[in-house]
Image (cartoon, rainbow, N blue to C red):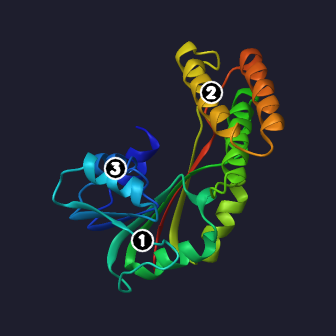
Amino acid sequence: MNAFEELFTDINGGRVLDVATGEGGYINILRRYLSSYASITGIDSSERVIRIARGVYQNPEIHFVQMDAEQLGFETGSFDTVNISASLHHLENVAKVLAEMKRVLKSGGRFILTEMHRDGTTEAQFNAVRIHHWAAAVDSSLGILHDRTFARDEMLDFVDELNFHNVTIRDFTNTNSDPMDEKTLKSIAGYLDRYVQRAQRTTGSQVLIQQSEELRRSLQEKGLQREPVLIVVAEKP
């Protein structure tokens, strides 16, 4: 049993809100592991990714809306389940977004957070963290909101501020995976290549490109394992 099976299969999702949905990738996890759901609404501030998500999902019970997560256009208590995944480090005001999610969640509803963090335990995991933070620096230099990932305790502090009940916390890590897996390393090399092309458009391109070469050398020496992930499920009083 994986962490999603353990945490989600007893949840009747009802009306589900997926905040910062991007292209809707996490919706597949919600559909697969929630015991049931009536509808899923994905919101994101980007018109481009909302358009992509609408093209991917043709289900009548799944729809997408362009919306600012800091000012959700829904009535208080509109949803039975609210979810956010892999997005905290892309938000300008995390606390405000989480407070809005709590507002639109009904009493007794479930809050779900799934987020990677920077507290790796192996050199191969640190490579994943360093690459992520380097990509964030490239995006930031282009005016794209993309911060470094949070520490695990920082994320738990955000959750504590919400004063939820029945908080369940699980950590997911893949330290048993092969850090020198050829397919994974090839995929990450392609990721670096794409971001180097972005970096070339920035004023600090020389430094960023030099850093990318250092990351490549570290990948060759130590490999890569995905960043650790924190999963939180809680209930609104």
* Distance from Cα at disc 2 to Cα at disc 3: 23 Å
Residues under numbered marks 2 and 3 in contact, where contact means CB atoms less than 8 Å apart: no
The quarter of the picture where residue 38 lies is bottom left
Q: Earlier in the sequence, mark 1 or mark 3?
A: 3
* Distance from Cα at disc 1 to Cα at disc 3: 15 Å
Residue 149 can be seen, yes or no: no
Q: Position of residue 229 (x, y in %)?
A: 58, 45
* Disc marking residue 193: 2
* Distance from Cα at disc 2 to Cα at disc 1: 32 Å
Q: Position of residue 101 (x, y in %)?
A: 47, 74
Structural crowding at the residue carrying mark 3, measured as other residues with C-alpha within 10 Å and reported as few (<14), some (14–19) or many (≥20): some
In this orientation, which residue lies closer to the viewer: 94 or 37? 94
In this orientation, which residue lies closer to the viewer: 227 or 130? 130
Q: Earlier in the sequence, mark 2 or mark 3?
A: 3
Q: How many marks?
A: 3
Q: Amino acid at mark 3?
A: Ile
Q: If the image is split into quadrants, where does the N terminus sit?
A: top left
Q: Amino acid at mark 1?
A: Met
Residue that appears at 77% across and 16% down: 221
193 vs 8, left or right, is right
* Disc marking residue 189: none
Q: Which residue is mark 1?
A: 67
Secondary structure beneath dot 3 equals helix
- As displayed, is residue 111 above or below residue 130? below
Residue that appears at 81% across and 43% down: 204
Structural crowding at the residue carrying mark 2, measured as other residues with C-alpha within 10 Å and reported as few (<14), some (14–19) or many (≥20): some
44 vs 55, left or right, is right
- As displayed, is residue 15 above or below residue 222? below
Q: Position of residue 175 (x, y in %)?
A: 63, 29
Q: Which residue is mark 3?
A: 52
